[in-house]
Amino acid sequence: MKKKVKKEVWDDKASNKEQQQLTHGIFRYFGKLPPTLTRKILSTLKVGQRDNNQYVELMCGSGTGILEAISVGAQATGIDCNPLAILSTKVKTTPLEITTLNRAIKLFSTANISNKIIQKNPPPLIRNINKWFTTKAQEELCAIRDWIETIKEENIQNIFRLTLASSIRPSSNASIRTGRIFHDHDKVAKSPLIEFETRLKKICAAISSLKDQKSFSNPSLHLADARETGLPKDKFHFGLCHPPYFALYRYSSDVTRF
């Protein structure tokens, strides 16, 4: 006789504000697991308690599960084959002093990039680049990218890199809706310089909220294939695997190659 399994249905009806607590809202990563649902899963399974505090997430994406796990006191390990995912997770889970965050904002505001747009390196090899970006947008994105490479402090450079990543699509002629990217003829693309500064301030404000999280411990992040991680066996108490929605978003899209 087959054993009947009791099913539970969880309705995740949280507001956008609830879904963007801490640093969850600093980067729009399509197909991510809702933070409030993740929190409920970890709470129900008592992740983070003394005998259940080793958490591993394969395909950690933008860091939703990692951030929630360390928020409840777990020792978290994240794995992803996408460098952008690891970057996002690192920025979202690294508390920084307000002086460091203010210095990051000041660095950009005093860089006068708009007066120094001299293209050192060409744009990435994007098919039909002029369809997706105006000439001015290409110049500004390249100037920001080249300037970021001159920043020596790793934590600040990581913030700038994620800020640039989050500014690219709004600065393009691509649709802003979730789903496959298409050219939006009615869209007025934003200035990369203005968009970068706006998003930088938002990201720094969110990171500043991490200082009140007393249980935080730095996660161990690995750029690796989830099928062969190289991590030790029998170490983790709880593992989460939330694969990306391949039908929802084209991760290899030309628009994201900056």
Image (cartoon, rainbow, N blue to C red):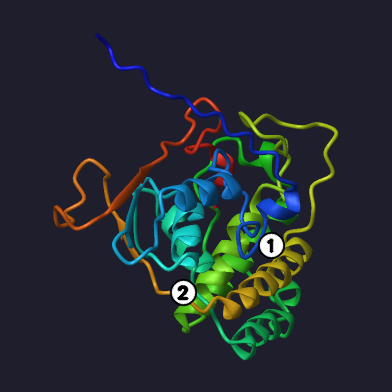
Which residue sits furthest bottom?
A: 99
Residue depicted at 51% across the width and 81% down the height: 151
Q: Is residue 252 above or below residue 110?
A: above
For the residue pair 50 and 123, the one nearer the viewer reads as 50
Q: Nearer the viewer, mark 2 or mark 1?
A: 2
Which residue sits furthest left?
A: 233
**Which label is found at residue 32?**
none
Residue depicted at 56% across the width and 44% down the height: 37
Which SS class for mark 2?
Answer: loop
**Which label is found at residue 216?**
2
Are the residues tagged 2 and 1 within 8 Å (C-beta)?
A: no
Residue depicted at 55% across the width and 38% down the height: 31
Q: Is residue 98 above or below residue 172?
A: below
Residue 119 visible? The answer is no
- Relative placement, left or right, of 50 versus 11 is left
Image coordinates for residue 235, horizontal then vertical, percent: 19, 58
Which residue sits furthest top?
A: 1
Q: Quadrant of the N terminus?
A: top left
Image coordinates for residue 230, horizontal then vertical, percent: 16, 54
- Relative placement, left or right, of 187 versus 38 is right
Q: Looking at numbered disc 1 in the image, what kind of residue is underneath it?
A: Glu
Q: Looking at numbered disc 2 in the image, what kind of residue is underneath it?
A: Phe
Quadrant of the rendered structure where residue 17 is? bottom right
Image coordinates for residue 160, horizontal then vertical, percent: 58, 70
Which SS class for mark 1?
Answer: helix
Q: Of the residues under marks 2 and 1, which one precedes in the sequence?
A: 1
Label 1, on which residue?
140
Residue 250 visible? The answer is yes
Residue depicted at 68% across the width and 86% down the height: 102
- Relative placement, left or right, of 13 versus 249 is right
- Relative placement, left or right, of 206 versus 88 is right
Image coordinates for residue 185, horizontal then vertical, percent: 81, 31
